[in-house]
Image (cartoon, grey):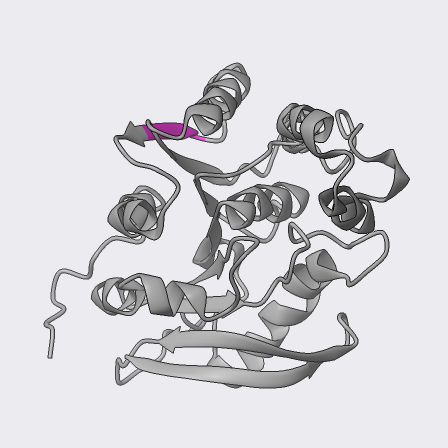
Amino acid sequence: MASLTLDFFSKALGKQTNVNVILPDAEEVPVNGWRTIVLLHGWSENYTSWMRNTSIERYAMKRQIAVIMPDGGFSFYNDMAYGLKYLTYLTEELPKTCNKYFRTSLLREDNFIGGLSMGGCGALTVGLTRPDLYAGLICLSATNFPADGFQAQYETLKDTEWLKSMKCIYGEIFPHLVGTDYDAYHLAGKIVSKGGPYPTIFHYMGLDETEGMEWARRMESVFLGFSGNPFHYKLVTYPGIHTWDSWDAHICEGLDYLGLAEVSDHCER
């Protein structure tokens, strides 16, 4: 595998930004380019976090996939009301940039997105906003599903600097996000009403993440409530807390569920 960092000027963000990239070492690039997963970091992390805290390079090598790890600041990966346009960057600019420099595929069936904590929520937001771009998504310990989590948090943190940060992201409607395009459940309902396309959803939550488990069970109820489970939604729970040890332990299960399994004839060097 090749591991590198791309530093470039993003027109969508209006500034220089960084992306960590893992590329397969196969002699021939597939006709349509590399199958690719974008991995999003949490709110206290940055584009280096997946490489520093997990064995994602080794997992990608066994699967012969490209991994793109962008920086998302503290944005929940939205086009911020008073800030940068991260959703536009991720969906319109980054795929074309990676295709140009790294020959990643632009086909929906070859593209996936995942993340942890804030990045897990971001994977839901991005993947459900643009289901035409992603065949599947991985949601690890996603924080604050807008249908319920933000409202509850607001009641205890409304007099802190946190509120200013959230207003920068969501604007003056915060925390009343239910039924808006910031609401993952609302986005899923729009996809169902249109008859697809449906990204497959793999969801992990640690059993010891008490508040997170409440949100996870709510999400499970919502997605399994759609007739026929069109998103092929799957929630898995194991003993664990909100840490990199848990996420590193379960990212491969998510990759496998999305069809990004290990290549049978691959040998480690």
* Main secondary structure found in the magenta portion: strand
In this rendered view, identify the residue nearer to me: 81 or 88: 81
Does residue 26 sit above or below 167 in this rendering?
below
Does residue 254 sit above or below 213 in this rendering?
below
Q: How many marks?
A: 0
Q: Which residue occupies 45% across, 71% down? A: 48
Is residue 214 found inside the magenta-colored segment of the image?
no
Q: Which residue occupies 47% across, 73% down? A: 104
Residue 75, image x and y in percent?
68, 54
Instruction: Mark yes or no: residue 203 visible.
Output: yes
Q: Is residue 9 left or right of residue 199?
A: right
Does residue 119 sit above or below 86 in this rendering?
above
**Which quarter of the rendered picture does the N terminus lie within?**
bottom left
Instruction: Mark yes or no: residue 259 visible.
Output: no
Is residue 233 found inside the magenta-colored segment of the image?
yes
Question: Which span of residues is magenta-colored?
Answer: 232-236
Q: Is residue 261 left or right of residue 37?
A: left
Residue 161, image x and y in percent?
75, 47
Residue 218, image x and y in percent?
52, 19
